[in-house]
Amino acid sequence: MIDLIETIFDTTIRAGTPILFGTLGAIICERSGVINLGVEGLMLIGALAGFAVTSMTGSFTAGVLAAIFFTMIAGMLHALITVYLKGNQIVSGLALAMLGVGVSALFGRSFVGKGLDGLSRIEIPLLSKIPIFGAMFRQDILVYLSVILVVLIALFFSRTRWGLYLRTVGENPGAADTSGIPVTRYRFWAVALGAGISGIGGAYMSLAYTPFWVENMTAGRGWIAVSLVIFSMWSAPRALFGAYLFGGINAAQLQLQAHGTSVSPYLLTMLPYLFTIGVLIWSTRRLEKGASNEPASLGLPYDREDRK
């Protein structure tokens, strides 16, 4: 029984990690006041870049760096449209999502069916021997990185001057501009950095979680990450909880299928997405009641000429 629980806990962590990266990237972007609905596309670009470069070089480090680089380029395109050209953030984000799907399908054709050995696990002495929870300390480097990022992002927003500036840009860009904070620069780099972090989530999919290439391998995880931003109330620690919650639901449905439950496998596969709808309904109700950390200027382009 303990072995089964450990297996579910291990699968929960691994299934939740790519969603966590996507959510953290979106949180950084939206804290600056820019909505990014293109997380799914960014994760697909990151998955393809990571897999392709690792296949050609044999270096997982090069693959992850390539995923960050190419998704940051895609993020900069979104930032150019929304921050500098004042384009519609919803439309640009959806276009970015579709771009990622198309690019990954086109350039990923030659990699279909190919696989990698996958990232090796690193066991932390003593802690990895703890029953059940020891599974947390028998993971690969990207899982550890995701948890470290949660801590760093939380500290960045609560303890650093640059984090305060970024929050101000998202809350009241006019006041930030009056105070001498370069609003467009902060927004541009927040979008680019957030895209790069989301790209690591895609790289995790193709290099660790399922280390072989299939088309559309993120399977909607980017959209789940978008919903988790609202569920987490733009908080990195809450994003960790939410991502692992979704990972747990995914792990549960996999175990139920493996043990031959009488429930339809199609219904079980739908569980994470049904839960996503439930989370959106619950989160929306909380937003209506004012229980939110939502940046006041989220989705609103800033033009200095309109400053009051």
Image (tube, rainbow, N blue to C red):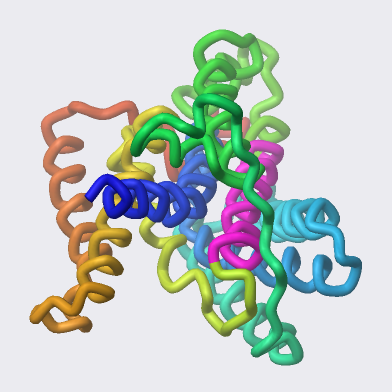
The answer to whether residue 39 is magenta is no
- Residue under the image location 27 percent in, 74 percent down: 258
Between 116 and 249, the one nearer to me in the picture: 116
- Counting every numbered tag in the picture gives 0
Q: Residue furthest right?
A: 57
The image shows residue 295 at horizontal and vertical percentages of 40, 30
Q: Does residue 89 appear to the left or right of 85 in the view shown? A: left
The image shows residue 66 at horizontal and vertical percentages of 80, 58
The image shows residue 47 at horizontal and vertical percentages of 65, 66
Q: In this picture, is 223 found above or below 109?
A: above
Q: In this picture, is 286 found above or below 178?
A: below
Q: In this picture, is 203 found above or below 188?
A: below
Q: Is residue 261 among what the camera can see?
A: yes
Q: Does residue 294 appear to the left or right of 194 in the view shown? A: left
- Residue under the image location 31 percent in, 59 percent down: 251
Q: Which region shows up in magenta? A: 188-209
The answer to whether residue 199 is magenta is yes
- Residue under the image location 20 percent in, 58 percent down: 275
Between 298 and 13, the one nearer to me in the picture: 13
Q: Does residue 76 appear to the left or right of 58 in the view shown? A: left
The image shows residue 198 at horizontal and vertical percentages of 58, 51
Q: Residue furthest left?
A: 262
Q: What secondary structure do most residues of the magenta stretch adopt?
A: helix
Q: Is residue 296 among what the camera can see?
A: no
Q: Within the image, what quadrant is residue 274 found in? A: bottom left
